[in-house]
Image (cartoon, grey):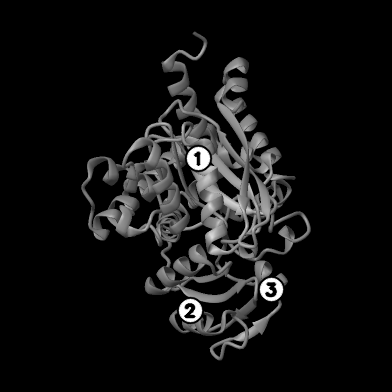
Amino acid sequence: MNALAATNRNFRHASRILGLDSKLEKSLLIPFREIKVECTIPKDDGSLATYVGFRVQHDNARGPMKGGIRYHPEVDPDEVNALAQLMTWKTAVVDIPYGGAKGGIGCTPKDLSMSELERLTRVFTQKIHDLIGTHTDVPAPDMGTNAQTMAWILDEYSKFHGHSPAVVTGKPIALGGSLGREAATGRGVVFATEALLAQHGKSIKGLTFVIQGFGNVGSWVARLIGERGGKIIAVSDVTGAVKNQNGLDIVDLLRHKEETGCLTNFSGGDHMDPNELLTHECDVLIPCALGGVLNKENAADVKAKFIIEAANHPTDPEADEILSKKGVVILPDIYANAGGVTVSYFEWVQNIQGFMWEEEKVNYELQKYMTKAFHNIKAMCQSHNCSLRMGAFTLGVKRVARATTLRGWEA
């Protein structure tokens, strides 16, 4: 099941639990605006190339729309639509005053030079500058984009609208980015994990963890869990997988990956088949990479007691049912990986105020938001006798529906 179908299914289930009016339900699903632009740029060799860019702005009932921009060859309108909708519910779950959006350009970033990427980013910004803005729609980095991409968008947008640091988040610190933003998604995952484990009378210390994905999110999750006394017994990324039943030394593993560019041949662990990682025996499994990795083929073999969805949509609905019947507790992506957008919100607030926070304040506020959101999700689970996923979806949908109704959506 693709991301859009799964998101729509979860939304409709939440809508039925909440007893939403059918017309309101339909209006919440329909995006506010879908933008498609053609971006033609001169390549370094003098030839012209055209790339298609998208921006889906899903909902603005609770505030400006918010979401990443990805550069990837498979950026397609369906996926962008699903992710924009997910952002609407995600920002509502953690109770930050945003709606959802998502964007992207169909391109292969590694095939483009730095100057070609800059030209492409600037042309894309020129095409959509009047449709984004500090109080309209605030982009952020995503797959294939980074702080530098945001710096180019900020600069290009400011040519039209004057200095506007709050138009994008995830910027370099020197241009108004927030301290703590780089680690935010991973740190949020760890705060969410602590909140869940506390409900079950456990803590990170002494438990065993398996992490799929060792990019920005996975490496921060691993580092922070290690600092809290958790034992990381297996890790994988696109280059391979490594395991050590006594616990991997994450600082050493990070150094090894930086020096060699891969996880293989790490002296502090044994090579393992990456396909076996998800079914490796552990207390907590944390998928931090791609969507759809837990499916009906492998779900029955999962041995973890807890799954923390740090990636977007890592669990197919069929796998969800199999795992729930096994008694596996799944902390849903819509909440678990919301640390990034929460600290993006803090960055936006700092930019608007023109007053920057210390990193300790950023991390303290993030923990407060993540912990409060978890208790609100648990309250919805108890009210509606539902799973954590439906608890999160009903919480998000209810908040957006309430804001929409208060604004007078039928007028």
| Element assignment for label 3 | helix
Residue 283 occupies quadrant? bottom right
Q: Is residue 54 visible?
A: yes
Q: Which residue is mark 1?
A: 126
Of tags 2 and 3, the one toward the viewer is: 2
Pick whichever of labels 2 and 3 is earlier in the sequence. Answer: 2
At label 1, counting other C-alpha atoms closer than 10 Å, the crowd grade (few under 14, some 14-19, many 20 or more) is some
| Element assignment for label 1 | helix
Identify the mark at residue 274; answer none if there is no mark. 3
At label 2, counting other C-alpha atoms closer than 10 Å, the crowd grade (few under 14, some 14-19, many 20 or more) is some
- Give the x, y percent position of residue 242: 61, 80
Identify the mark at residue 396; answer none if there is no mark. none
Of tags 2 and 1, the one toward the viewer is: 1
Of tags 1 and 3, the one toward the viewer is: 1
At a point 42% along the width and 31% down the height, the residue shown is 136
Q: Is residue 177 above or below residue 391?
A: below
- Separation of disc 2 and disc 3 at Cα? 18 Å
Is residue 199 shown left or right of residue 36?
Answer: left
Q: Is residue 332 visible?
A: no
| Element assignment for label 2 | helix
Q: Amino acid at mark 1?
A: Gln
Q: Residue furthest right?
A: 297
Q: Which residue is mark 2?
A: 254
Q: Amino acid at mark 2?
A: Leu
Relative to the observer, which residue lies in front, 105 or 275?
Answer: 105
